[in-house]
Amino acid sequence: MLVADLQHFLDLGPDTPGPARKLAEHLAGIVAAASAGDAHTPWETALPCRRRPANRRCPGRITVVCPQPDQPIGWRCTCCGDDGTISNWSASIYDLRRQQLTAAQPRHDIIIDADTAAILRTLPFLDNDCQRAVFAIRALNNELHLAMTDTELDELINTLAAESNHEPHRRRQRQLDTAYDALTAATDQPR
Ligand SMILES: [Zn+2]
């Protein structure tokens, strides 16, 4: 079990070796997802497992449970059992808990693939509600569900379009465009 203190993984310098940076990204994603989703009950995120047993990517996804803010987040891979805890996460930049109660609004339930979920996690400059929805993407029966209001969906689509316009790398631009198409198609579906 990996027992981690998030504070040790913030502000890594440019000399930080790749594996340490990858681990920091893994932990940051878990904190973002755990704090974005339901508290107290374990749920399966869209985050892929970081392990590569026998040089093949573990097909599992990360299940998280978000406790009281002063308690460590728990996580576990659905496939290989890789697991850990993360302490000192609350009030960090990855803590996406809602700061105030808001009235529940109707949401689209959009089924997306793992590549789209991954590209959405890389978008800079998302507002808090969009970022929360992206990290709260939930795996149910092996499908990934993105739940968003109309306003959040519009914001996300606009961000994807702007990001694609400025993207110099063709491969990432294609991924952004695929995500754009998937989400635009969802706006035509009833909520
Ligand atoms: Zn695994």
Image (cartoon, rainbow, N blue to C red):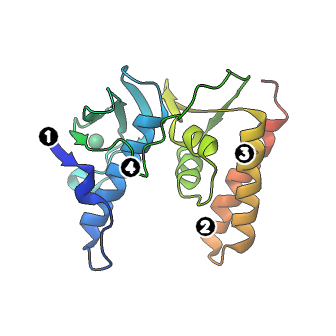
Q: Amino acid at mark 2?
A: Arg
Considering only order in the chain, which callout, 3 or 2, is on the residue closer to the N terminus?
A: 2
Per the image, the residue denoted by label 1 is 1
Residue 65 position in % (x across, y down): 34, 28
Measured in 3D between alpha carbons, the distance from the residue under mark 1 to the one under mark 3, in whole angstroms, is 37 Å
Q: As rendered, which of 68 and 165 lies closer to the eye?
A: 68
Q: Can you tell me which quadrant of the image ligand 1 is in? A: top left
Considering only order in the chain, which callout, 3 or 1, is on the residue closer to the N terminus?
A: 1
Q: Residues within 10 Å of mark 2 (few under 14, many from 20)?
A: some
Callouts 1 and 2 close, C-beta under 8 Å:
no
Question: Residue at coordinates 36% horizontally, 23% vertically from top-left?
Answer: 42
Tell me the SS state at disc 3. helix
Question: Residue at coordinates 69% horizontally, 54% vertically from top-left?
Answer: 178
Residue at disc 2, CB closer than 8 Å to ligand 1:
no
Q: Residue furthest front?
A: 100
Q: Amino acid at mark 3?
A: Ala
Say which quadrant the N terminus sits in: top left
Tell me the SS state at disc 2. helix
Q: Amino acid at mark 1?
A: Met
Question: Residue at coordinates 59% horizontally, 51% vertically from top-left?
Answer: 120
Measured in 3D between alpha carbons, the distance from the residue under mark 2 to the one under mark 4, in whole angstroms, is 28 Å
Measured in 3D between alpha carbons, the distance from the residue under mark 1 to the one under mark 2, in whole angstroms, is 34 Å
Callouts 4 and 3 close, C-beta under 8 Å:
no
Q: As rendered, which of 16 and 128 lies closer to the eye?
A: 128
Question: Residue at coordinates 16% horizontally, 44% vertically from top-left?
Answer: 3
| Left or right side of 89 for 29 | right
Q: Residues within 10 Å of mark 1 (few under 14, many from 20)?
A: few
The mark closer to the camera, 1 or 2, is 1
Per the image, the residue denoted by label 4 is 92
